[in-house]
Amino acid sequence: MKKNTPNKLKILNDPIYGFIQIPNSLIFDIIEHPYFQRLRRITQMGFSNLVYPGANHTRFHHAIGCMHLMQKAISVLRFKQVQISKEEENALCIAILLHDIGHGAYSHALEHSIVNGISHEEISLKFMRQLNKEFNGELTLAIEIFEGKNPRKFLGQLISSQLDIDRLDYLKRDSFYTGVTEGNISSDRLIAMMNVKEDELVIEEKGIYSVEKFLIARRLMYWQVYLHKTGLVAEHILMNVLKRAKQLAEKGEQLFASAALHYFLYNPISIDNFTDKTLKMFSNLDDYDVFSAIKEWVNHSDKVLAMLSKMIVDRNLLRIEIQEEKFSEAYLLKNQQKAIKELEISEKDVHYFVFQQPITHQAYTLKMPIFILNKKGKLEDIATASDQLNLQALTIPVVKHFICYPK
């Protein structure tokens, strides 16, 4: 009897782009792999849904959207006589599909609490190398492009630059799901204006206004969404919850945790000891493990862990103030003393509830310019090619300071 083989040329329906086609069976098999399916359980925007209730989309969503935009970009460049081989096309689609595979639960919170000294990019690379073994070396070129080691510079720029496919998807997607229309960019128009000159990924002159809009949209999305004060507080409380849990685990305290979370709480994790076993455990760790643990920790005997966990579960967060200058030591001390008295906690634990930090964002950096290809065939940095005075201002990093303390 003939065995049923699955149809691997599936079509997915995306709320932003409509139908997305999976281009071939290798990419289908990568998407089907448990490592990639885990991205369905990692939210794209962490705790932003505490501010924007619609922001529940996942890293899986984003990665599939990126693959779709990459296919569009490749066909535009080929139409403009840029030579891209079948192997390079496949490698670009795989590299952009897997660019975020190393993200931990709630995106960046794990990197700053229980997994130290190893970034999500390095974990992405470990996943890609592991998949490369399983797929008999078929990801070698994708890894080379992802690492920026391919001699054709523009291939790497499609994956990572100031106008890469990743940004073209997440700005449009995050704007759609949050309902913040200021971030809605025309990714189609930007891709249609792409070209390659002197091995650089460039935008043709008639696309200059779309690039301006893109840079301004990115700035607005950062201050209005990604660095929104409520989202900031929630993320820092989450990091403090995990730091506290890790501290208790190091002392041998018993904590409710799934097998994967238990592994990361009870073992020191760094880049030096990130083994194949660690990678396997990491591939089983997602938002569900973290949130189900936090729900249990609300009743833990450790007061600090219980209070912080309850803040997240009930969305009853710390108060936050943001200003241009750093808050004075006297103001910090005053809030610390008040918290010690009102929460009845010790001086050594007050930093979990009262803390200040700078936040910084630079909308455009001159180190990795976006080049405009003018009518004479010359390349010009967008900051000088644009008649929009604001663009020069966008190259200056904006630094603000925030302080959090109990209400």
Image (tube, grey):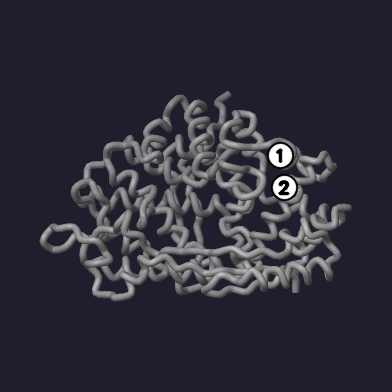
Residue 349 falls in which quadrant of the image?
bottom right
Would residue 105 appear left or right of 26 to someone viewing this image? right
Q: Amino acid at mark 2?
A: Asp
* Image location of residue 88, percent across then percent down: 32, 38
In the depicted view, which residue is nearer to us: 328 or 41? 328
* Residue 179 visible in the current orientation: no
* Image location of residue 67, percent across then percent down: 43, 49
- Tell me the residue at 82%/45% (across/down): 256
* Residue 80 visible in the current orientation: yes
Q: Amino acid at mark 1?
A: Ala
Residue 250 falls in which quadrant of the image?
top right
Q: Earlier in the sequence, mark 2 or mark 1?
A: 1
Residue highlighted by disc 1 = 260
Alpha carbon separation for disc pair 2 and 1: 8 Å
Instruction: Tell whether label 1 touches label 2 (CB within 8 Å).
Output: yes
Residue highlighted by disc 2 = 289
- Tell me the residue at 53%/36% (across/down): 127
